[in-house]
Image (cartoon, grey):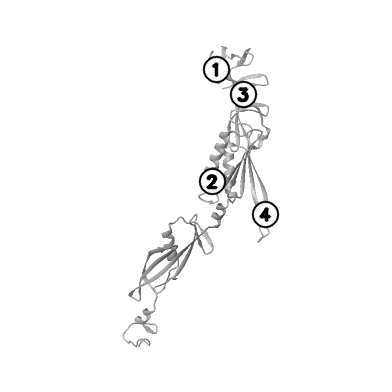
């Protein structure tokens, strides 16, 4: 057989032409001369096939991956090797060289391609929202029938920031663009509803309390006709605090711990501990605050009682000793609380 293109009769034939004529127009790879890569100027996310994907890669690596993604290797090539090199940056365009090596029907060949990769920097939808101060939820931090203490606000700020920092790994809208400091409490504006709920639960875990959600219609999506809502999440911490005295089921209790799902208190008469679920806390009545605890000196002691002087009128008061109070001695100073004209000796 002879090659109809060059007339050769002594060369390997590939189809109807010889190997030399076949390789003359053969391409190891196909790659566009110009490639565009769209990345977010704020978070470096990439836009691919209409979808944004997170990327913390340096610019150089993004260019190399764009080259790799656009290379199509001919099926007839074996043992291919492809070298990529960024020769120089001109503004937002990388001038690159792609060198391809391979074997085709046992013959080693090489080819070079000049490729420009242009980086288009814009803002992804998430970062656009962040830049505009977008938010989906508002956490209303409140207390029942009392003012919130400065140290509680400080702790709440810490809880909010710590929770958002943790959430940010999987939710880029886990941020707080605004805090409104109102007389009745703080309002924390949270980027996403998902992270807003995480913040509310974290506050409840720290302070106890009840959570309630209230959606509010803010506008309508013209394309779908559906309402767009923001969610107000109220977290109301209780009127009572650790160290306060409460009445529950006709018992006088000292609050020892406030948790996410329960209150732990001890009966000041019997020393018995009680766990009160949050669903029952509406039955709790605050009867004395921690600041109402007074000091008194012991002036006399028997095996079962001690005598103190009333801090108000200095009259002598007898107090019964519980088993864990037997080591109190004359001259000691003890904590007492007056409730319904009766003094209780505290542990």
Which residue is identified by label 4? 219
User: To which quarter of the image does residue 188 belong?
Assistant: top right
Which is more N-terminal, label 2 or label 3?
2
Select label 3 or label 1 by which is in front. 3
Question: Could you classify mark 4 by the number of other residues whose Cα lies within 10 Å: few (under 14), some (14-19), or many (20 or more)?
Answer: few
Q: Which mark is residue 292?
A: 3
Select label 3 or label 4 by which is in front. 4
Give the distance between the C-alpha atoms of the residues marked 3 and 1, in whole angstroms: 16 Å
Give the distance between the C-alpha atoms of the residues marked 2 and 1, in whole angstroms: 46 Å
Residue drawn where x is 54% and y is 54% of the image:
127
Which is more N-terminal, label 4 or label 1?
4
Quadrant where the N terminus lies?
bottom left
Which residue is identified by label 2? 164
Which is more N-terminal, label 1 or label 2?
2
Q: Is residue 138 above or below residue 61?
A: above
Q: Residue 56 location in percent, x, y?
A: 46, 55
Q: Is there a contact, CB below 8 Å, between mark 3 and mark 1?
A: no
Which is more N-terminal, label 1 or label 3?
3
Q: Residue 248 location in percent, x, y?
A: 66, 29
Question: Could you classify mark 2 by the number of other residues whose Cα lies within 10 Å: few (under 14), some (14-19), or many (20 or more)?
Answer: many
Select label 1 or label 4 by which is in front. 4
Q: Residue 324 location in percent, x, y?
A: 55, 21
Question: Could you classify mark 1 by the number of other residues whose Cα lies within 10 Å: few (under 14), some (14-19), or many (20 or more)?
Answer: some
Give the distance between the C-alpha atoms of the residues marked 4 and 2, in whole angstroms: 27 Å
> Which of 46/100 is in front?
46
Q: Which mark is residue 333?
A: 1
């Amino acid at each position: 057989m002879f090659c109809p293109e060059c007339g050769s009769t002594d060369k390997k034939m590939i189809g109807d032409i010889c190997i030399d004529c076949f390789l003359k127009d053969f391409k190891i790879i196909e790659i566009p001369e110009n490639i565009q890569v769209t990345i977010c100027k704020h978070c470096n996310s990439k836009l691919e096939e209409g979808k944004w994907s997170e990327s913390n890669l340096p610019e150089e690596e993004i260019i190399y991956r764009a080259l790799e993604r656009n290379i199509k290797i001919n099926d007839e090539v074996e043992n291919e090797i492809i070298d990529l090199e960024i020769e120089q940056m001109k503004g937002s365009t990388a001038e690159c060289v792609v060198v391809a090596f391979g074997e085709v029907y046992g013959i080693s060949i090489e080819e070079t391609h000049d490729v420009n990769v242009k980086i288009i920097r814009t803002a992804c939808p998430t970062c656009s929202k962040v830049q505009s101060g977008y938010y989906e939820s508002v956490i209303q931090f409140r207390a029942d029938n009392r003012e919130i203490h400065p140290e509680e606000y400080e702790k709440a700020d810490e809880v909010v920031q710590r929770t958002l920092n943790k959430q940010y790994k999987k939710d880029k809208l886990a941020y707080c663009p605004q805090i409104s400091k109102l007389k009745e409490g703080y309002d924390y504006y949270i980027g996403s509803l998902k992270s807003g709920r995480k913040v509310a639960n974290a506050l409840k875990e720290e302070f106890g309390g009840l959570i309630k959600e209230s959606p509010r219609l803010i506008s309508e999506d013209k394309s779908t006709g559906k309402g767009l809502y923001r969610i107000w999440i109220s977290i109301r911490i209780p009127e009572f605090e650790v160290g306060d005295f409460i009445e529950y089921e006709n018992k006088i209790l000292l609050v020892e711990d406030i948790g996410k799902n329960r209150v732990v208190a001890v009966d000041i008469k019997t020393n018995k501990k009680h766990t009160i679920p949050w669903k029952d806390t509406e039955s709790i009545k605050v009867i004395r605050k921690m600041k109402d605890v007074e000091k008194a000196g012991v002036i006399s002691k028997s095996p079962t009682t001690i005598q103190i002087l009333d801090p108000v009128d200095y009259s002598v008061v007898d107090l019964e000793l519980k088993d864990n109070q037997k080591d109190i001695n004359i001259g000691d100073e003890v904590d007492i609380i007056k409730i319904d004209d009766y003094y209780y000796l505290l542990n």
